Amino acid sequence: MSEQAGEPEGTPAEKRPVRVYLVDDHSMFRAGVRAELDTLTDAIEVVGEAGTVGEAVAGIGHLRPDVVLLDVHMPDGGGAEVLRQSRKPHPEVVFLALSVSDAAEDVIAVIRAGARGYVTKTISSQELVTAVLRVSEGDAVFSPRLAGFVLDAFADRPGAAPINDPELDLLTPRERDVLRLLARGYAYKEIASELFISVKTVETHVSSVLRKTQLSNRYELSRWASDRRLV
Amino acid sequence: MSSPSASQSTAVAEPAAPRLRRRRQGRAIAGVAGGLADHVGVPVLYVRVAFAVLSALGGAGAMAYGLLWIFAAQASTDDPAPEVSARERQQAFGLIALGAGLTIGAGTLSGTVNGWFAGSIGVTLVGAALVWREADQSQRRRVKGALLGGGGRSALVRVLSGGALVVTGIVMVLISSMGLDQVQFTLLAVVAALVGVAMLTVPWWLRMVRDLGDERRARIRTEERAEIAAHLHDSVLQTLALIQKQADAPREVLRLARGQERQLRSWLYGPAGYGGVGGAAGGSLAEALARASGEVEDTFAIKVQHVVVGDCELDAKLTAVVMAAREAMVNAAKHAGVAEVSVYAEVEPETVTVFVRDRGKGFDPEEVPEDRHGLADSIRGRMERNGGEIKLRTAPGDGTEVQLHMPRAKVAA
């Protein structure tokens, strides 16, 4: 779901609330998010929080939350380090990065470390709820900014590095269309009607783009990721 | 070439630093072999054997060792120092003897130098090695100008004997060339003396250079910190103060916070800001659009989410696009009744496309009064005069999207 395209789709059918774990080194921010999520919806339950990488890794292992809201910039390696240490032992836990940074290096690095989405901290509470619910169902969450970065990284430029693996290093025209609309601030539903496809298909395209963003060896992606020394 | 020293340690790979550092612990001469072994990740024995064997090639091994000694800095004192076996140390000294022997032997056998000459060079080198080694010890003790670096009486003895060996070696060279005439001999003596002084003082020169580097780095850090502090003071702290004063005017607070956030962001991550390379050309499309979005955000207290894919130099046509886009944002801010506007620009090889979109009221294009010029003149007129086109998608209650297409100058011409 796009950052501002907050469509409170909710999940009335959901029986059990989504269990969320907060990781951020600012306790004030954690308290704010917790309060927002608690008051806004019953579909999300904040089960714990951590202020350091070590606490986070231990807490995630212990509580097995459904979704981890992860700050990108923290001492001792930041969100990427939490991802590195927690992804292997707990592949079922889903990570959503939440950061003040809009820099391509940060966004791409944490996505490549395994986050299923990236939203900035200025996101509205309602949009955050939607984003959490969406990643908890296994979808990817692309903010317009992230969509822009990915489009940029996969752009065909004269003199770009040769494509090694077309499967991973190229976007299909359809994926490109979806990304463009995401970058333009369209919600999934709007994208679906714009392209005459179902919301499910939009989700499939976005997930596929996420996979490519994580696995492709395209120069821009690996450079952005390594610029922050996170991957 | 040198005396043994108390030593322990095996491969201690330095974690983060990929630079070659001579080992401080567990060294036989200067820690060059150990450092190299750590650096490339092989047992130190292999490296030592390689040096010894290479010495047979006209002393290449010894030469390489000396150069690495000079140019590689020492590891820091607080590195862990694990055990080294007595056997390993024995091997090391055996290999040193072998290397020295091969260097001199190979030189003598190949006839490039005679035995006497090689011997005197050897004596000189051993003396220099002694002095250098002492300098390594005293490094970081930072006793200014002191040859001994606070090493005590034994250090004094070692340095003096090293110096004496160097002098002896030089004298031996001079004696061997007694047959020369007066002028040549004097010349040789002067050169030899200079070489001796240079050899003995190499460690101190190097240390001076490194200290200078350290000092420069420290100064740069301080300056950097001052710059950050000054910037944060001028911008963030001032804005926070303003926000406190305006606490009962939420709209104003929002505007201030947004404006400040954008400023700080562009300073931290922008091309011309703190994190960027600086001096990026002021006229790119992305920057112009960012500026325009910022102005609209500030003026109308709304959020403009702008995303730009690709970038290019701004020319007259593209300036018109940016102006038209700005006008579209202003329209959205004024009339749509929303808190957020999305702007998306894509630079393709042949065209530039900008979308300005809101989820607001929308309107019926047929019913716009004749006297409203914004859309007609500022957007459509501007685009068409410059060879571009505009598409409008809106309906009452359905938001508005203005699409601006402009062919790029070079390709279109």
Image (tube, coloured by chain):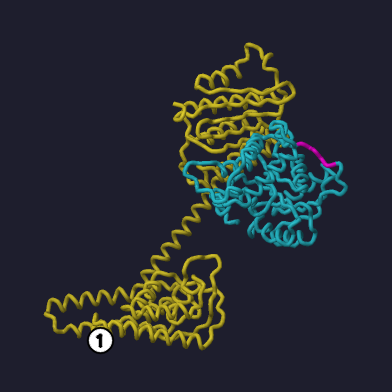
> In the picture provided, is B100 more to the left or to the right than A46?
left
Q: Quadrant of residue B258?
A: top right
Q: Quadrant of the C terminus of chain B?
A: top left
Residue at the location (80% across, 46% down)?
A35
Viewer-nearest residue: A142 or B226: A142
Q: Quadrant of residue B327?
A: top right
Q: Colour of chain B?
A: yellow
What element does badge 1 sit on? helix
> In the picture provided, is A209 more to the left or to the right than B311?
right
Q: Position of residue B407 (x, y in %)?
A: 51, 27
> In the picture provided, is B385 more to the left or to the right than A216?
left
Q: Position of residue B256 (x, y in %)?
A: 64, 36
| Residue found farthest to the front | A166
Viewer-nearest residue: B164 or A69: A69
Vertical relation: A230 (above or below) B408 = below
Q: Quadrant of the N terminus of chain B?
A: bottom left
Q: Main secondary structure of the magenta part?
A: loop
Vertical relation: A172 (above or below) B213 = above
Residue B317 seen in the current view: yes
| Residue B100 within the segment the image draws in magenta | no
Instruction: Give the letter of the cyan chain.
Output: A
Residue at the location (33% across, 78% down)?
B57
Residue that label 1 marks: B115
From which residue to which does the magenta span run?
A7-11
Viewer-nearest residue: B378 or A30: B378
Q: Position of residue B324 (x, y in %)?
A: 56, 24
**Amino acid identity at mark 1:** Gly
Q: Position of residue B71 (x, y in %)?
A: 40, 69
Residue B161 seen in the current view: no
Dot 1, crowdedness within 10 Å: few (<14), some or many (≥20)?
some
| Residue found farthest to the top | B370
Vertical relation: B235 (above or below) A82 = above
